[in-house]
């Protein structure tokens, strides 16, 4: 599927006379894996064999070295960012053995640095691509010289390592300028030296090196990794920007610092340039929890993830936020910091429901629920016992909310999202607890964590790319507020309440959404404490209709069979239904538990009730689903209903 998408995009670019139309999923991947001490293939859909690039691997569960390989030097030629070591031929250790068209391969790794059995690892892959990333090798001359590159835009950051001798890594960053350098393997602040880059800024075709031995020693060989600064992208409006290299000040000891990139990041590396600090690395696959602990690695050190535990940073819909209790404890107030930020993906809309939605009725086999994709929202519920629902998401981390209750979020150690093909971590995930799993994707689903300010007309950016048709809000830190729901089928003046059976109620448009319908870029909030109280924190889940993948719609009951056309070809795998003109539960059915021509097991999001298995409520219908029950919650004659269906 991913290869097909890339081919179509490349063809579209060629047809238009332009370059390949890139999305971040084409050129960057954070891929987490567990070592097996044997052989394994890391399939991250990045074409290293054909396009070239770089792979960076770091053990997560033990204090092991960082390892960098690239297609210019070869898979078996490693460098270690946290040391001064020269290039090491790793062929005999059988580590990273090949660059593939969709990732890379690992061997038995006798030294254990990239594939130690049962250890956990993080890998970050950059593909060579204009406006994003390039790898260049050159031989030093000992005299000021230029080196050509293929970014097509000015580099925002260049990381250089001599490969023939044990020397420090040298770093140019656009924010510190062409008269200063930093060292990737050291904590020291930026140093001034005209001999580093000859006081010359890089251009869109070349960069300049001076006479420092670590950058341009006569006869020595070097590799340079070039990161573009292109937050606005070729469109100039940020819709296709992939990478940013910038700076900010950490502020006072009690200050939050917001950095606007124009898009939401998935990977960040920070370093204070004005004082001695580590090079801190965070990413959303390992976890950047909004209001929770963030796993941190250091490019200049071999420490594992356990060294730090704190709320250092939050991602936002348009950038990131430094927390006063987090980064200030590592960096200190009023420090100047530089960063590299890479955009979150996917940036392309999915082509099928299976790419972004799954149900697993028994996660006990592998101690996690299996989806086939990284999960952004995971929901589970006991179908045999009257236990509450649990809603967890990647943005909030190891916390849960209950859709049958007004309760504030609470900690949930089971809610773990560092899995490439599922979520959760417990041997107790038996068939009693089915899970419904969603991936954020343009046109389908998005999640936004935000803080309330009590100001009517306040807007909250999102990345759905289309106007949401169903929005579910919940206050995270207070038990005083219900779950409030906007439905485009009802209009902005109406509200629904997810944790009750109540009918839609009018007269809430100004209080809840400032009488303003959501757009493709933002939702507007009123002054209502339920969804925008000053000092409170919230989560919002946004759904939309994506042809062939999802449908947000409505129907009118007849008391007889109602065929609901969603535009699908193989029927709906998931259906959520709510009656709006009268009381009714929020009913959930899915094909994993049974949408058949017979009794259909269903659960209600607003109650702790066990699964009902004694009613025939929905039948399969290739274009969507058929409602056959005459029960008022499903199909009362003249009753009005909204639904969310996923193919």
Image (spheres, rainbow, N blue to C red):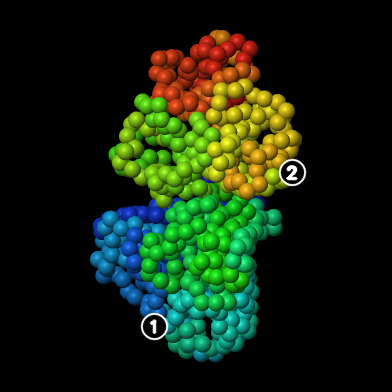
Residue 619 is situated, as x and y percent measured from the top left of the image, at 47, 18
Spatial separation of the CA atoms under disc 1 and disc 2:
58 Å
**Badge nearest the viewer, 1 or 2:** 2
Residue 115 is situated, as x and y percent measured from the top left of the image, at 30, 60
Residue 10 is situated, as x and y percent measured from the top left of the image, at 56, 52
Q: Nearer the viewer, residue 346 or 47?
A: 346
Tag shown at residue 457: 2
User: Can you see residue 373?
Assistant: yes
Q: Residue at x 47, y 43 (%)?
A: 410
Q: Nearer the viewer, residue 586 or 101?
A: 586
Q: Nearer the viewer, residue 639 or 5?
A: 639
Q: Residue at x 45, y 27 (%)?
A: 608
Label 1: how many Cα within 10 Å (few below 14, some 14–19, many 20+): some
Q: Residue at x 51, y 37 (%)?
A: 407
- Residue reaching furthest front? 480
Label 2: how many Cα within 10 Å (few below 14, some 14–19, many 20+): some
- For label 2, the SS is loop
Q: Which residue lies under the disc numbered 1? A: 166
Which image quarter: residue 383? Answer: top left
User: For the image shown, how many numbered marks are present on the structure?
Assistant: 2
Q: Residue at x 44, y 14 (%)?
A: 616
**Image-based side of 101 in relation to 17, left or right:** left
Residue 456 is situated, as x and y percent measured from the top left of the image, at 74, 43
Tag shown at residue 221: none
Q: Nearer the viewer, residue 51 or 534?
A: 534
**In the displayed structure, would residue 177 be above or below residue 637?**
below
- For label 1, the SS is loop
């Amino acid at each position: 599927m991913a290869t097909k998408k890339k081919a179509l995009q490349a063809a579209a670019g060629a047809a238009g006379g332009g370059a390949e139309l890139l999305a971040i999923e084409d050129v960057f991947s954070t891929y987490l894996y567990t070592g097996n001490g044997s052989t394994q293939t890391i399939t991250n859909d990045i074409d290293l064999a054909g396009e070239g690039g770089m792979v960076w691997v770091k053990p997560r569960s033990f204090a092991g070295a960082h390892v960098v390989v690239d297609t210019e030097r070869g898979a078996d030629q490693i460098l270690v960012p946290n040391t001064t070591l020269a290039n090491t031929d790793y062929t005999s250790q059988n580590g990273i053995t090949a660059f593939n068209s969709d990732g890379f391969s690992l061997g038995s790794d006798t030294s254990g640095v990239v594939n130690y059995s049962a250890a956990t690892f993080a890998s970050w892959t950059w593909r060579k691509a204009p406006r994003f990333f390039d790898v260049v090798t050159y031989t030093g001359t000992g005299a000021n010289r230029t080196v050509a590159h293929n970014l097509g835009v000015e580099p925002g950051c260049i990381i250089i390592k001599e490969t023939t001798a044990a020397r420090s890594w040298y770093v140019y960053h656009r924010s510190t300028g062409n008269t200063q350098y930093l060292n990737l393997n050291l904590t020291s602040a930026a140093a001034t030296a005209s001999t580093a880059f000859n006081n010359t800024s890089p251009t869109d075709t070349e960069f300049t090196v001076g006479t420092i031995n670590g950058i341009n020693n006569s006869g020595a060989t070097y590799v340079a990794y070039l990161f573009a600064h292109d937050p606005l992208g070729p469109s100039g409006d940020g819709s296709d920007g992939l990478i940013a290299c910038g700076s900010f000040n950490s502020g006072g000891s009690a200050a939050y610092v917001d950095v606007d990139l124009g898009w939401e990041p998935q990977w960040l590396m920070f370093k204070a340039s004005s004082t001695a600090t580590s090079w801190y690395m965070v990413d959303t696959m390992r976890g950047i929890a909004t209001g929770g602990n963030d796993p941190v690695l250091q490019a200049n050190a071999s420490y594992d993830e356990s060294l730090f535990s704190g709320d250092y940073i939050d991602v936002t819909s348009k950038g990131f936020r430094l927390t006063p209790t987090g980064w200030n404890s590592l960096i200190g107030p009023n420090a100047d910091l530089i960063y590299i930020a890479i955009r979150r993906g996917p940036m392309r809309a999915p082509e099928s429901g299976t790419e972004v939605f799954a149900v697993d009725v028994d996660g006990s086999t592998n101690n996690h629920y299996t989806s086939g994709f990284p999960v952004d929202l995971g929901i589970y519920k006991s179908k045999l016992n009257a236990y509450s629902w649990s809603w967890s998401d990647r943005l909030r981390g190891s916390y849960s909310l209950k859709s049958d209750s007004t309760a504030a979020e609470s900690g949930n150690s089971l809610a773990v999202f560092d899995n490439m093909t599922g979520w959760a971590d417990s041997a107790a995930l038996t068939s009693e607890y089915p899970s419904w799993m969603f991936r954020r994707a343009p046109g389908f689903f998005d999640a936004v964590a935000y803080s309330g300010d009590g100001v009517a007309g306040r807007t909250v950016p999102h990345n759905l790319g289309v106007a949401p048709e169903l929005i579910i809000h919940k206050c995270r830190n207070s038990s005083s507020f219900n779950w409030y729901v906007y439905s485009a089928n009802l209009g902005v003046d109406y509200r629904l309440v997810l944790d009750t059976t109540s009918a839609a109620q009018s007269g809430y448009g100004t209080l809840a959404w400032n009488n303003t319908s959501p757009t493709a870029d933002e939702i507007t909030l009123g002054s209502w404490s339920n969804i925008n109280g000053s000092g409170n924190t919230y989560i919002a889940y946004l759904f939309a209709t994506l042809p062939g993948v999802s449908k947000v719609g409505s129907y009118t009951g007849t008391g007889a069979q109602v065929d609901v056309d969603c535009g699908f070809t193989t029927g709906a795998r998931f259906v959520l239904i709510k009656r709006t003109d009268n009381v009714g539960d929020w009913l959930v059915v899915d094909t994993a538990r049974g949408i058949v021509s017979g009794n259909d097991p269903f659960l209600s999001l607003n109650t702790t009730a066990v699964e009902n298995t004694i009613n025939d409520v929905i039948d399969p219908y290739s274009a969507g689903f058929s409602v056959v029950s005459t029960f008022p919650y499903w199909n009362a004659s003249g009753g009005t209903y909204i639904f969310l269906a996923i193919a």
